[in-house]
Image (cartoon, coloured by chain):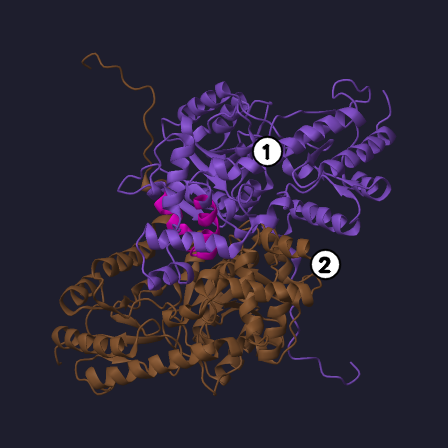
Chain colours: A brown, B purple
Amino acid sequence: MDGAAAPLITPLRLDAGALHRSATHPDADAMTFLNEIMARYPDAISFAPGAPHESFFGGIDIAALVDRFVTYLRESRRLDEQAVRRTLYQYGPSRGIIVDLLAAALAHDLGMPVDERSLVVTVGAQEGLLLTLRVLCGGADTVAVVDPSHVGITGAARLLDLPVVGIPDHGDGPDLGRLRAACAAHRVRVLYVAPDYANPGGTRMSLTARHELLAAADELDLLLVEDGAYAFTAGPDDLPPLKALDTAGRVVHVGTFAKIGVPGARVGYVLADQPVAGGGVLADALCTVKSMLTVNTSPIGQAVIGGLILQHDGSLRALARAKATLYRRNLTHLLGALRRHVGAPAGRTDGVTWNEPDGGFFVRMRLPVEADPALLERSAGQYGVLWTPMRAYYVGDGGARELRLACSYLSPGEIDEGAARLARLLTDVCPDR
Amino acid sequence: MDGAAAPLITPLRLDAGALHRSATHPDADAMTFLNEIMARYPDAISFAPGAPHESFFGGIDIAALVDRFVTYLRESRRLDEQAVRRTLYQYGPSRGIIVDLLAAALAHDLGMPVDERSLVVTVGAQEGLLLTLRVLCGGADTVAVVDPSHVGITGAARLLDLPVVGIPDHGDGPDLGRLRAACAAHRVRVLYVAPDYANPGGTRMSLTARHELLAAADELDLLLVEDGAYAFTAGPDDLPPLKALDTAGRVVHVGTFAKIGVPGARVGYVLADQPVAGGGVLADALCTVKSMLTVNTSPIGQAVIGGLILQHDGSLRALARAKATLYRRNLTHLLGALRRHVGAPAGRTDGVTWNEPDGGFFVRMRLPVEADPALLERSAGQYGVLWTPMRAYYVGDGGARELRLACSYLSPGEIDEGAARLARLLTDVCPDR
């Protein structure tokens, strides 16, 4: 105390422990680490991001897409110029401004009736997942998720302070015995599932498994939250989504235009047609909650997606076609490169195995050693190849020795070289047993 | 049981009571009723929506704005064409892609240093409010809000299951005695306040009240969530926002481009520069949670806003100038029309009074009778004029005899005619005492 007066006001410094756990969860650290290591090794070939291939971006013309949608507003909805401008630039309905196009496209592609009042347009699938959990789950409810799962669903549950129980994926969807046990132990109202080439596991549910899951949902009084992000990558043998098989109203279907359209539009949707006693359907409740979350999805972003749908004759399937072809080519190429460089999945003697999905963006590889941040750092620094540790995708304690390889973002040449680098890493760190 | 087999599966029908309370709250009903009555009486003059004036929409050219931002990406950020396309169309950082422009604009306009790492671009101010509450408040925390308040903040709290306590607005900001009492009774970590022409009350805090509130926040260990949506409508006597006076790091500032830019871009921001022990600032935590809410704000929408900022020499104040002029004209016109048609606020003998703010979109009127849905219905059907009942804006039991008049959306002629219609209603329903 040498004469200097203490400041009257102490500048605030927040304690990390005082922040909500969704802001400081280790999963966020894992993703930060991944982004940081990608930035530090820009020349490494990265199997990490499940991001859309950028070759499609060259063909995007925002002005032309918005114009296409504006022509539709004028000609089909008979809007005058003032109403057109209001639709694009003013606040708009929480439900969205392209639900008519979307309902027609889904009805056409899935061969089922879809009422536009059952739809809500969301800021990507992520907002759709969060809205669905919020409307259906209260403080006493546990969210069941297929395990491993997309971090978006576990993150959304954490944001809402909802506990999560993982239902192991047995390779053909969630293990129904484990689901029944979870429902006996907890109050479970929803199960999140991605039946088509799930991120991160790459598995696809068979038609039989889909029917069995729907029957189990009815038996257990569950709603299924279906994430359909990767279904479009199926080839001619595509299977109907759970929603198209859903005679009992057990499925809420969440979709996105990030993969088949433009990620930067940030447009997804939820199809929630369950009637609510007293009037309306579940989508109405989602709209109400959305008005407190983001108010409405940017109509400019919606106009871009609306223009894309119109350009492809009102069909999401048509919109997705060229992209599906590229991703299937990349996946086939990755699986071939792994066989050439790493060996046959069952033929290695060191315990390295991987699945061989026939669609989606992802291959799951199991190692005899931990696929942890230290191995990733070594892989990047010494071998010039990056991948995603699977640990953060598990609710349970699985995944410590698993990694995810995404092929969506790369060229065939990069996939080849990346597989060769990965093979060198594996040879060095996974000695023969 | 006349031989027909019961269906094995009963189509699901959800009980409204099983949905989260944020989906079925009476406030949502009040807003639905307002929208519904506006649709039923399309020829009524509506003082209800606080929406931006549509005369500005004619000048919006999305392609030109995006081009302006693209030129900036090429010339100032030195991005090549592939990187430009990636910035606009690919998934992007949760923080946003215009934080540099935004930081420079805020620093210029407010005369204070603003680090772009203290900013996060949000899907409108609404997502910013929700993120801020989520990061700062857990289950044991009560959210304090100035009462009456924008329904966005009370809705966000409800969505997160956080209890809310209202701190009455005594005409010069929140009553500090009531704030101290609330902090003694509850664990309060944040107070929401809109110092400049608050929605719905129209009040503005004096400079003295701002300093006193900042000192109280420090004394009570609170963070102030400042909503700056209407500050731009101040004339030459504008006052600094709380954030510009905040020497102790007590203010999180939430802003929006809906009023000064384009609502349809759905772009807002949060300035949260509080250091967090262990590294980083509060904005980093907001980014982490945003990645689980909307992932990122549409870069196409951000490009539109970035283009607008660049077109106005990097100044939000310049961007807002023409709009501020129109809204001040409309407000002056409304206040004049009320004096002409309804009388002087203090001169009526029937108990009808109203405030006369010098900025913002809103006038608050007090009646001697209930301003309830029945009166609104009568006002619309018999008098052809609409307004917003204030009840839904109150946390406490206030507002039953208050209504809000918004002037932002109307022309001077509509304002005149609307005030005349309102005067006829008031004369008929508020007899002299």
Q: Nearer the viewer, residue B395 or B109?
A: B109
Q: Hey, which quadrant is residue A394 in on the image?
A: bottom left
Q: Nearer the viewer, residue A192 or B184?
A: A192
Q: Chain of mark 1?
A: B
Q: Amino acid at mark 2?
A: Gly
- Using a 10 Å C-alpha cutoff, classify the residue at mark 1 as few (fewer than 14 neighbours), some (14 to 19) or many (20 or more): some
Q: Position of residue A173 (x, y in %)?
A: 43, 77
Is residue B394 among what the camera can see?
A: yes
Q: Which residue is mark 2?
A: A278
Residue located at (39% from left, 71% from top): A199
Q: Hey, which quadrant is residue B333 in on the image?
A: top right
Residue that sits furthest to the top in the current view: A3
Q: Which residues are magenta?
A: B283-310
Q: Nearer the viewer, residue B251 or A353?
A: B251
Q: Which mark is residue A228?
A: none
In the structure shown, which secondary structural element does the residue marked by tag 1 occupy? helix
Q: Position of residue A423 (x, y in %)?
A: 18, 78
- Dot 2 and dot 1 within a common chain: no
Examine the rendered structure and indicate whether residue B265 appears above or below residue B274. below
Is residue B397 among what the camera can see?
A: no
Q: Quadrant of the N terminus of chain A?
A: top left
Q: Chain of mark 2?
A: A
Tell me: B139 left or right of A428. right
Q: Amino acid at mark 1?
A: Thr
Q: Is the stretch drawn in magenta largely helix, strand or loop?
A: helix
Q: Which residue is mark 1?
A: B325
Residue located at (74% from left, 21% from top): B345
In the structure shown, which secondary structural element does the residue marked by tag 2 occupy? loop
